[in-house]
């Protein structure tokens, strides 16, 4: 029988919640790493679902969570969906607060590297597939999103190195998944920014008004169809 574990970060909203819903409904074994969990997720926790509460912006919490992860994942096939991210701080370089700079770097860049490194070190597991949820902002500079662009671009390069390192082994595979613009709380945060902080704010308000944002469940189904095959 196939032994497969799917590790997902950030399941309390948006794409992560949709992935949780879709994968839980078909009985996949899930390990969820998130700052908070919804009541329905807590109710579903048990043999097939482990909920590890962790603030990914805090390195101590991440290290403790990695210890738990090592105990929960020992063998078989592992899929890591690197999903959690924050768009903040939104604003001009020169007006950034150092606490927010740290939080973005830890959440979007350093924590996924730590988790990937720990999973890659588990010699008992047969294969590791990393699905890195990326964004166009990792490839194009967007004024007002300096940390989001920089951390997502940095992580994209980290995973490119992992893919190059593992090219001949086949034990670790990396997929980059760009979800496009989705109707999630992250987009609500973007719409709240003033034009001073984010010059394209009007354009993003129009995406919502004109129904151009994708439903996260539709996007989750696409990710699963392309890379997981339940
Ligand atoms: N929305 C878009 O249009 C869009 C476009 C391109 C790419 N993406 C990418 O898609 C992914 C999902 O985004 P989304 O729109 O679904 O965002 P979202 O609705 O804001 O959800 C982000 C998830 O990450 C969690 N998270 C944030 N900071 C955390 C922390 N410090 N520790 C632990 N968990 C934390 C959130 O938990 P809390 O509830 O505790 O905050 C939430 O569960 C991200 O990688 C994003 O870069 C999104």
Image (cartoon, rainbow, N blue to C red):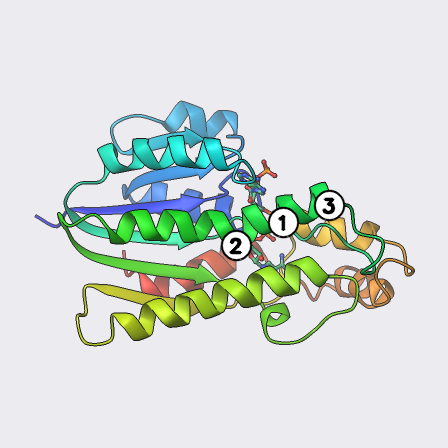
Of helix, strand and loop, which one carries label 1? helix
Expressed as whole percent of the image width and height from the top left, the position of residue 225 reads 35, 64
Compared to residue 138, the image places residue 183 above or below, namely above
Of helix, strand and loop, which one carries label 3? helix
Whether residue 177 is visible, yes or no, is no
Q: Is residue 61 left or right of residue 205?
A: left
Real-space CA distance between mark 2 and mark 3, rounded to the nearest whole angstrom: 16 Å
Q: Earlier in the sequence, mark 2 or mark 3?
A: 3
Is the residue indicated by label 1 positioned so its CB lies within 8 Å of ligand 1?
A: no
Of helix, strand and loop, which one carries label 2? helix
Which image quadrant is residue 92 in?
bottom right
> Which residue in the protein does label 2 denote?
109
Mark 2 vs 3: CB contact within 8 A: no
Real-space CA distance between mark 2 and mark 1, rounded to the nearest whole angstrom: 8 Å
Compared to residue 195, the image places residue 43 above or below, namely above
Q: Nearer the viewer, mark 2 or mark 3?
A: 3
> Which residue in the protein does label 1 denote?
104
Is the residue indicated by label 2 positioned so its CB lies within 8 Å of ligand 1?
A: no
Compared to residue 16, the image places residue 170 above or below, namely below
For residue 98, which numbered disc appears in the image? 3
Q: Is residue 166 left or right of residue 155?
A: left
Expressed as whole percent of the image width and height from the top left, the position of residue 216 reads 55, 54
Figure quadrant of the C terminus:
bottom left
Q: Is residue 103 left or right of residue 120?
A: right
Q: Earlier in the sequence, mark 3 or mark 1?
A: 3
Q: Earlier in the sequence, mark 2 or mark 1?
A: 1
Mark 2 vs 1: CB contact within 8 A: yes
Residue at the location (31% across, 31% down)? 68
Which image quadrant is residue 7 in?
top left
């Amino acid at each position: 029988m196939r032994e497969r574990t799917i590790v997902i970060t950030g399941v309390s909203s948006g794409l992560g919640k949709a992935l949780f819903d879709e994968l839980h409904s078909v009985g996949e074994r899930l390990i969820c790493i998130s700052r908070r969990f919804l009541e329905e997720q807590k109710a579903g926790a048990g043999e097939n679902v482990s909920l590890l509460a962790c603030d990914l912006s805090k390195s101590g919490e991440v290290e403790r969570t990695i210890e738990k992860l090592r105990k929960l994942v020992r063998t078989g096939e592992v899929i890591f969906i690197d999903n959690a991210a924050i768009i903040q701080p939104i604003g001009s370089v020169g007006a950034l607060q150092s606490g927010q700079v740290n939080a973005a770097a830890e959440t979007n860049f350093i924590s996924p590297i730590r988790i990937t490194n720990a999973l890659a070190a588990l010699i008992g597991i047969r294969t590791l597939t990393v699905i890195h949820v990326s964004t166009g902002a990792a490839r194009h500079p967007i004024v007002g999103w300096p940390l989001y662009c920089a951390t997502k671009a940095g992580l994209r390069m980290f995973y490119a190195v992992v893919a190059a390192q593992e090219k001949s082994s086949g034990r670790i595979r990396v997929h980059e998944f760009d979800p496009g613009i989705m109707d999630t709380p992250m987009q609500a945060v973007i719409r709240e920014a003033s034009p001073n902080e984010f010059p394209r704010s009007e354009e993003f308000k129009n995406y919502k008004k004109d129904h151009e944002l994708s439903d996260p469940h539709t996007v989750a189904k696409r990710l699963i169809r392309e890379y997981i095959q339940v």
